[in-house]
Image (cartoon, rainbow, N blue to C red):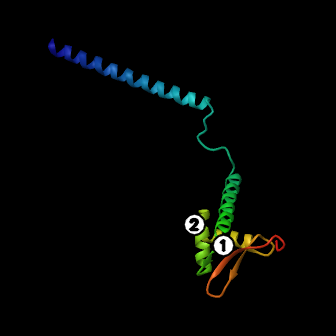
Amino acid sequence: MRLSEREKEREKKADELKEAQERALKEAHKREIQKALDGSKAVEDISSEERFYNRSVKIRKGIMGFLVDNEDKSYESLGDLEAQAANAAKCSMVTARRWLYQFTREGKPFQIVDKGNFYIIRGRSLSQV
């Protein structure tokens, strides 16, 4: 008889554990449903075009900020200047080179002056822009 009482007690504990697990699953499911109803999104609701455009704007601001902050500073090589700009804007050197060209070409507010053995970032006067 004693053996059957132990078995009954084990079965009772197993049943209680199973019920507790089922309750936990139901509660987790309820939380998931509530989260969905609250409007929290798993993924941002923006298009890839918007995401790439926003990144481009951040890079442009970074490059322009670099030019403003480093006006009249000299660099040993154009590659060094591009690398520093890329680090400032958190982009690749190729991207930095492209935007440096855009902001330093004729009619733009900055220029990169080649002094033979070094380069200088210079601002153009308003009459030159």
Farthest residue toward the top? 1
The residue indicated by pointer 2 is 87
| Residue 106 placement: quadrant | bottom right
Q: Quadrant of the C terminus?
A: bottom right
Q: Is residue 127 left or right of residue 93?
A: right
Disc 2 residue crowd, few under 14, some 14–19, many 20+, Cα 10 Å: some
- The foreground one among 83 and 36 is 83
Mark 1: secondary structure: helix
The residue indicated by pointer 1 is 97
Of the two numbered discs 2 and 1 in the rendering, the one whose residue sits closer to the viewer: 2
The image position of residue 32, as x and y in percent, is: 53, 30
> For the point 66% across and 43% down, which residue is it?
45
The image position of residue 79, as x and y in percent, is: 60, 78
Q: Is residue 9 left or right of residue 126?
A: left
| Residue 7 placement: quadrant | top left
- Checking the image for residue 29, the label placed there is none
Farthest residue toward the left? 2
- The foreground one among 116 and 71 is 71
